[in-house]
Amino acid sequence: MSTSDPTSAPIYTTSSYLPPRHATRWDSGHLLQLVDILCEQYHLSHNEALIATQTFLRHFRLCPDNEELSLDKWRLLLWTRALGEKYANLAGDVYRRWLQLRYYYLALSPEVLSLLVKLRTHYHLALITNGPSRAQWEKVHYLNLRCHFDLILVSGDLPWEKPHSGIFLEACHFLGVEPANCLMVGDKLETDVQGGLAAGLGGTVWIPLSSSVLPNLLQCDTHPTFTLKSVTDLPRILPSPMKPVVRTKSRDLQGFTSLVQNLSLLSLPDLDDCNSNSSHSSQCSTSSDGS
């Protein structure tokens, strides 16, 4: 990354690598807790609870959004199918508990929140995420990410997704900076690092989610500028900032307007009229950065 003007250099991150506050991966953590809830509160056997939960999560990951239904109705339908005829009447309650657990486990750790606040004092921060628009903006909303970023781009709103250079160059254009003055931070070599390289960004940072994927680096042609164990190590590789970044109201307003337009599609779960076993053709939106 160019150090000629460090305060103009945006740092791009990906939604799948904003570490949650819990050390356990959120999917395994809330899976086990859901199984316990189904057993203890709804009297499913352990095997029934485990199969239902795994079935829901498998189909949810394959198709997190269905364009023909609201997010709530689609997820409720997936839970209804996963629970089967015997427990279909529990789908509404189980969905609400799953949604609560999902965002409990996805919530950012205090250390990461503190890091974002400190970085944003001296750098522009942008969040670039792959995935269907409604599902990704729901994450932004429930995790209260807007206040930590100057720009949030969701591939579902754009003609490109990572690793296409277009989504990175769009962020540069919006923020009014040169790609050579930008740093990409992410956990996926094939989208985050490769995309940053394709866009000609000044540097890329790979933060693998597990040490077991480190051999992947030796087996591919995509090599990051830096590899870190944790996102909290990021400050040690950044140039020393000289002055606070100056933000223009017009840029903030444009980003906020984009967010408001997308949040208008969201609602809190309203499941009174959704308890249905009827089938729907799947118009799936996939390629998400995370579940």
Image (cartoon, rainbow, N blue to C red):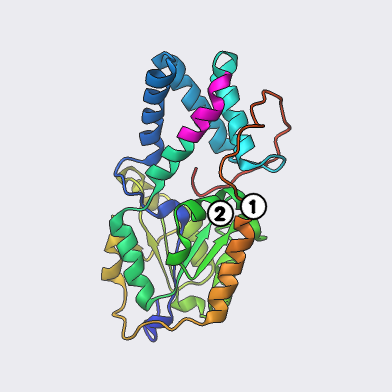
Q: Where is residue 243 drawn, in percent x and y?
A: 33, 85
Q: Residue at x 49, y 28 (%)?
A: 94
Task: Give coordinates of residue 23: x percent, y percent.
Answer: 29, 44
Residue 227 in view of the camera: no
Name the residue type under label 1. Leu
- CA separation in Å, label 1 and label 2: 9 Å
Q: Which residues are magenta?
A: 88-97
| SS class, disc 2 | helix
Dot 2 amino acid type: Trp
Task: For label 2, count other residues whose C-alpha is less than 10 Å away and answer few (under 14), some (14-19) or many (20+).
Answer: many
Residue shown at the point (40%, 21%) measured from the top left: 41
Identify which residue, 221 or 84, lies in the foreground: 84
Q: Looking at the image, which residue is at 31% across and 81% down? A: 241
Query: Secondary structure under badge 1?
Result: loop
Measured as percent of width and height from the top left, residue 236 is found at: 26, 69
Q: Check if mark 1's residue and mark 2's residue have beta carbons within 8 Å.
A: yes
Asked where in the image residue 199 lies, by quadrant, the reply is: bottom right
> Looking at the image, is 218 positioned above or below residue 275?
below
Question: Which residue bears the numbered disc 2?
Answer: 137
- Percent position of residue 175, x then y: 53, 77
Q: Residue at x 35, y 35 (%)?
A: 29
Residue 23, compared with residue 223, is above or below; it is above
Provide the residue designation for mark 1: 265
Magenta span main SS = helix
Q: Seen in the image, is 89 located left or right of residue 18?
A: right
Q: Quadrant of the N terminus?
A: bottom left
Q: Earlier in the sequence, mark 1 or mark 2?
A: 2
Q: Is residue 264 left or right of residue 235?
A: right
- Mark 1, Cα crowd under 10 Å, few <14 / some 14-19 / many 20+, is few
